[in-house]
Image (tube, rainbow, N blue to C red):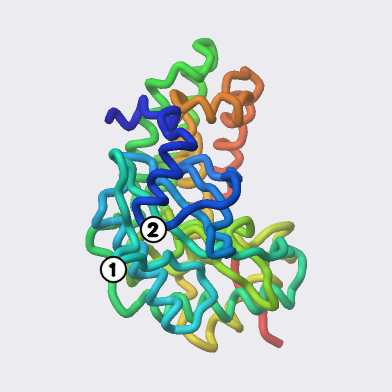
Amino acid sequence: MNNSAFNFQALSPDLILDALESVGLVAESGLIALNSYENRVYQFLCEDKKRYVVKFYRPERWSESQIHEEHVFSHDMSEAEIPAVAPLDIRGNTLHSHQGYLFTVFPSVGGRQYEIDNLDQLEWVGRFLGRIHQVGSESVFIARPTIGLDEYLIQPRNVLENTALIPKRHHASFMAATDKLITTISEYWHDDWQPLRLHGDCHPGNILWRDGPLFVDLDDARNGPAVQDLWMLLHGGINEQRLQLDILLEAYGEFAEFDTRQLSLIEPLRAMRMVYYLAWVARRWEDPAFPKSFPWMKDEDFWLGQTAAFTEQIKKLRAPPLQLMPMY
């Protein structure tokens, strides 16, 4: 299948039910689609009266070996009593195939939304991230990638240069801002860090709260610096972020050592995510779900705003990096 043109239109309810029956699961209820752009995810009630979630992977995004590494990592965390949702082992496998689709079944777990302004919850999350990284440091992914400039900047830059989403009269100015941002990121990015297995996309939406944090969606797991799993939890003004960072790292430090030199990577990582995100949507535009979910991607004002945001991010890259609050 051509990944750039692929969509999930062939993934019919009958195909999903057949796939579940192929691993011995008979859905007793209808399928409830859960929020997921990259993959297709459905909740259902099984004849055993338990609720499950089935995830169908987007073809050609990850290889089988890369998906297996994600599953091994999630099971490593579960064995260490870290609250992360791991796939079920059914008939000796966690990854299954049906009519060309790879899929995985998870237990259905619920929870409240993680409260980004709740400092007690932030402390809990920091403690468990320390434990996740303690497990993550025991080995590195072999098949999965390591965060770097090529995947997050060079390849996305080429996608953006060729996308038809950018209005022609704004294309040159946007690409000029993109190139300047990439050049600036390259000046401040360094790889003087110990790679470890990361959650990779640890934003507040991937944390549920059930008498403590529950980490979900390891689809973007990869090798990288520890700070990648921390910076997206910071928000607000500089003083608020310093307070949050202090709480986060004090709790984190109970289980894993954090190299404070990685704080200088926060703004480069933020900038890399900005570029990568736009290219990700452009890559997936042929999937009918994307134009419906991101209609503003064809608006002139959106691309003018992105050009301005890239220019503003250059200023943040050149400013002193975020530091811990001073000790008195």
Quadrant for the C terminus, please: bottom right
Badge 2 local density, few (<14 within 10 Å), some, or many (20+)? few
Disc number for residue 92: 1
User: In the rendering, at what x and y percent does residue 104 appear?
Assistant: 40, 55
Q: Using the image, determine if residue 180 lies above or below residue 29.
A: above
Q: Which residue is mark 2?
A: 24
Direction from residue 290 to residue 71 in the image, left or right = left
- Quarter of the figure with residue 33: top right
Direction from residue 128 to residue 196 in the image, left or right = left
Query: The disc labelled 2 sits on which kind of residue?
Result: Gly
Q: What residue is rendered at 45% in x and 50% in y?
A: 55
Direction from residue 187 to residue 234 in the image, left or right = right
Q: Confirm whether residue 50 shows in the render.
A: yes
Q: Secondary structure at mark 2?
A: loop
Q: Using the image, determine if residue 104 lies above or below residue 261.
A: above
Q: Secondary structure at mark 1?
A: loop
Q: Closer to the camera, 43 or 134?
A: 43
Q: CA distance from mark 1 to mark 2?
A: 13 Å
Badge 1 local density, few (<14 within 10 Å), some, or many (20+)? few
Q: Closer to the camera, 195 or 104?
A: 104
Q: Closer to the camera, 195 or 237?
A: 195
Q: What residue is rendered at 43% in x and 54% in y?
A: 219
- Quarter of the figure with residue 93: bottom left
User: In the rendering, at what x and y percent does residue 260 appear?
Assistant: 49, 74
Direction from residue 169 to residue 283 in the image, left or right = left
- Quarter of the figure with residue 25: bottom left
Q: Mark 1 against mark 2, which lies toward the viewer?
A: 2
